[in-house]
Image (cartoon, rainbow, N blue to C red):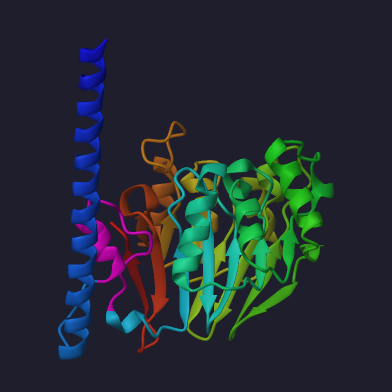
């Protein structure tokens, strides 16, 4: 018994010494790093940012490192990498609006991303439609930031969603007393010096994808079209309405699915760049070859979050759209 007790005590002492050594090493490293950054700032040496420090330890950066010219850009569209889901942060003149919030597991990461981007308040949060891969992280966002307005799809156009994620989100909106309204076609929402306009609120359907809110965000230098998971029926109704949808930037419909992104619709949009938000090796086969062919037909540059991580489109000093990625 005494021998076992001595062995356990020695192991405990060894573990404590190892732990103390690791903690001491980490503290010394942080002190040295802090001193290096201070000296670098005093002498004007280029210093690493947080993303670069993360990369030293093998972590993907949360926010892409933007070129110097982008730091002062008034307009940025952030396609946040949330895996197999959607979340788009619109930034203009220091104001922010959010379209969708990914899967439930992405809630903390989205909140962290918004914090590191400088978000203190959201002018609006828009739910394109009530599927979990678009609203899963929304509860976490609403609890983390003040929100001026919640924009909801027209639930009368489809059977009411009953998922736990959706019902908990409605409870959160009510509990936090966030002003909410149903999107109306033609409605406009100012954001900084830009405006987000509702192009479509979908069609009467049994398919929740087809009540997706379709929006155009517009500034003097950029037009950005987002269509949630809207499928062919919605794209057809938009084309028949004659509403202008030409845009510089397009978030691929339904994660690049073949049920969306018809050639006729994409050719009406004529995007210079398309961003597909989808998960790596996803089981849905997104993006589909037919969608990629549609984008190729208009010579659009295609960016995929499964390959490039988070994608940021921004307007440079010459009023040109540029793209930065985290991978």
Q: Residue at x 50, y 43 (%)?
A: 257
Asked whether residue 50 is drawn in magenta, I would say: yes
Q: Position of residue 261 (x, y in %)?
A: 51, 51
Using the image as rendered, state which of residue 21 and residue 262 is in the foreground: 21
Give the x, y percent position of residue 201. Answer: 73, 57
Residue 63 in the figure: left or right of residue 95: left
Highlighted range, magenta: 49-67
Instruction: Tell me the chief SS of the magenta region.
Output: loop
Q: Position of residue 102 (x, y in %)?
A: 54, 49
On the image, the x and y values in percent for residue 106 come to 51, 48
**Above or below 261: residue 268:** below
Whether residue 281 is visible here, answered yes or no, is yes
- Is 75 in the magenta? no
Please identify the quarter of the rendering in which residue 301 is found: bottom left
Q: Residue at x 47, y 47 (%)?
A: 256
Residue shown at the point (46%, 74%) measured from the top left: 76
Instruction: In the rendered view, tell whether residue 34 sits above or below residue 157.
Output: below
Q: Is residue 325 left or right of residue 92?
A: left
- Horizontal placement of 95 versus 278: left or right? right
| Quadrant placement of the N terminus | top left
**Of residues 320 and 113, the one drawn nearer to the viewer in this rendering:** 113
Name above or below for residue 36 compared with residue 86. below
Instruction: Please name the residue shown 80% across and 66% down the image.
Output: 179
- Farthest front residue? 2
């Amino acid at each position: 018994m005494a021998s076992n007790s001595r062995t356990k005590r020695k192991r405990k002492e060894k573990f404590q010494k190892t732990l103390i050594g690791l903690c001491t090493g980490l503290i010394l490293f942080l002190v040295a790093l802090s001193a290096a950054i201070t000296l670098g700032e005093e002498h004007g040496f280029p210093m690493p940012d947080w993303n670069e420090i993360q990369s030293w330890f093998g972590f993907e950066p949360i926010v892409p490192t933007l070129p110097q010219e982008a730091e002062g850009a008034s307009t940025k569209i952030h396609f946040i990498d949330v895996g197999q889901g959607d979340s788009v942060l619109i930034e203009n003149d220091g104001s922010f609006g959010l379209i969708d919030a990914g899967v439930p597991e992405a809630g903390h990461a989205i909140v962290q991303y918004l914090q590191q981007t400088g978000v203190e308040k959201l002018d609006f949060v828009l739910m394109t439609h009530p599927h979990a891969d678009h609203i899963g992280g929304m509860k976490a966002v609403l609890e983390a930031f003040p929100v001026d307005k919640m924009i909801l799809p027209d639930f009368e156009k489809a059977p009411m969603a009953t998922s736990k994620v959706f019902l908990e989100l409605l409870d959160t909106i009510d509990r936090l007393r966030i002003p909410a309204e149903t999107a109306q076609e033609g409605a406009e929402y100012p954001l900084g010096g830009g405006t987000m306009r509702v192009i479509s609120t979908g069609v009467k359907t049994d398919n929740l994808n087809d009540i997706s809110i379709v929006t155009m965000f517009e500034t003097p230098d950029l037009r950005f079209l987002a269509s949630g998971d809207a499928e062919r029926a919605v794209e057809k109704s938009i084309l028949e309405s004659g509403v202008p949808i030409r845009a510089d930037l397009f978030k691929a419909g339904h994660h690049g699915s073949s049920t969306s992104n018809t050639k006729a619709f994409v050719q009406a949009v004529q995007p210079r760049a398309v961003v597909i938000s989808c998960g790596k090796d996803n089981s849905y086969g997104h993006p589909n070859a037919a969608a990629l062919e549609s984008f190729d037909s208009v010579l659009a540059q295609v960016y995929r979050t499964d390959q490039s991580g988070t994608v940021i489109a921004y307007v440079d000093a010459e009023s040109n759209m540029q793209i930065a990625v985290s991978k």
